[in-house]
Image (cartoon, rainbow, N blue to C red):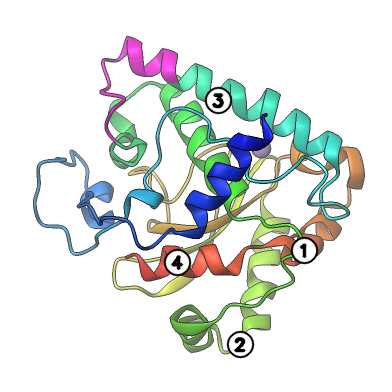
Amino acid sequence: MKQTTRRSFIQKSAIAGVGTLIALPSINTLMAAGSNSDNPATPFLLSNDFKTGFDQTPLAYANNALEPSIDAKTMDIHYTKHAAAYSKNLKEAAAAEKVDMAKPLEEVLGSISKYSVKMRNNGGGHYNHELYWKSMLPNANAQPTGKLQTAIEKDFGSIDAMKKKLAEAAMGRFGSGWAWLLATADKKIIVASTPNQDNPLMDIAEVKGFPLFGIDVWEHAYYLNYQNRRADYVENFWKILNWNYVGERFNSI
Ligand code: MN
């Protein structure tokens, strides 16, 4: 990727939050079977910065910028091979199933049961990875602040208790999938995990809500560096989690 592209993305990210707010379907609407994107009942407004398109967004950092938590080769293969394939296959499915790709992907995910398995796997795969890249920041070493901190402490007792639950969800996911911190429609913060490339926006998800961030626990996310040590990968993920971005997501709903 060209450095200029990264720089412009970073500049754009830096001013996130001052952009025009546009109405998107609420998570209630997205979660409802047969969701209707024309439904004006939207208690949540997501800013333009939080809607997801069908193409990959350029990474805001270099492949080696998240070391030692995530090594450069894993980042390279993960972004340019695995995640690129989800986007490509999603667009194929969207074209075949006559999805309007000018609309946010969130609309498709909210009624994913109406679409093909290819759409479910790749729509989820693309959304999940777009969120994953944005949720990480080189040398973040941060903690949640503001309303998000208050909400986590209210719902879990402490930040450490939340981290422990999320790590348990990541370790308890057998095979491939994701561990999530998400907000429910009434803004409670909870932990969940999903198999494969499913996510909490999907109408078929056991636990539904707005994903604040997700930890990819597919082996392709950590195996080169950590082999079977998923727990170490999860432990090191906290060091590169962009709590500022996660907090903006929470504040946006
Ligand atoms: Mn992945």
Q: Secondary structure at mark 3?
A: helix
Residue at 68% x, 57% y: name it.
Answer: 137
Label 3 belongs to which residue? 86
Residue type, numbered disc 2 = Ser
Q: Quadrant of residue 253?
A: bottom left
Q: Secondary structure at mark 2?
A: loop
C-alpha distance separating marks 4 and 2: 20 Å
Residue at 35% x, 18% y: name it.
Answer: 94
- Numbered label attached to residue 139: 1
Q: Quadrant of residue 96?
A: top left
C-alpha distance separating marks 3 and 2: 36 Å
- Numbered label attached to residue 118: none
Place of residue 227 in the rendered image (x, y in percent of width and height, measured from the top left) = 91, 43
Label 2 belongs to which residue? 158
What is the span of residues highlighted in magenta in the rendered image? 91-103
In this view, 96 is above or below 88: above
Label 4 belongs to which residue? 248
Q: Are marks 4 and 1 in contact (CB under 8 Å)?
A: no
Q: Magenta segment: does it hold 45?
A: no
Q: Residues within 10 Å of mark 4 (few under 14, many from 20)?
A: some
Is the residue marked 2 within 8 Å of ligand 1, measured from its CB?
no
C-alpha distance separating marks 1 and 2: 23 Å
Q: Nearer the viewer, residue 69 or 36?
A: 69
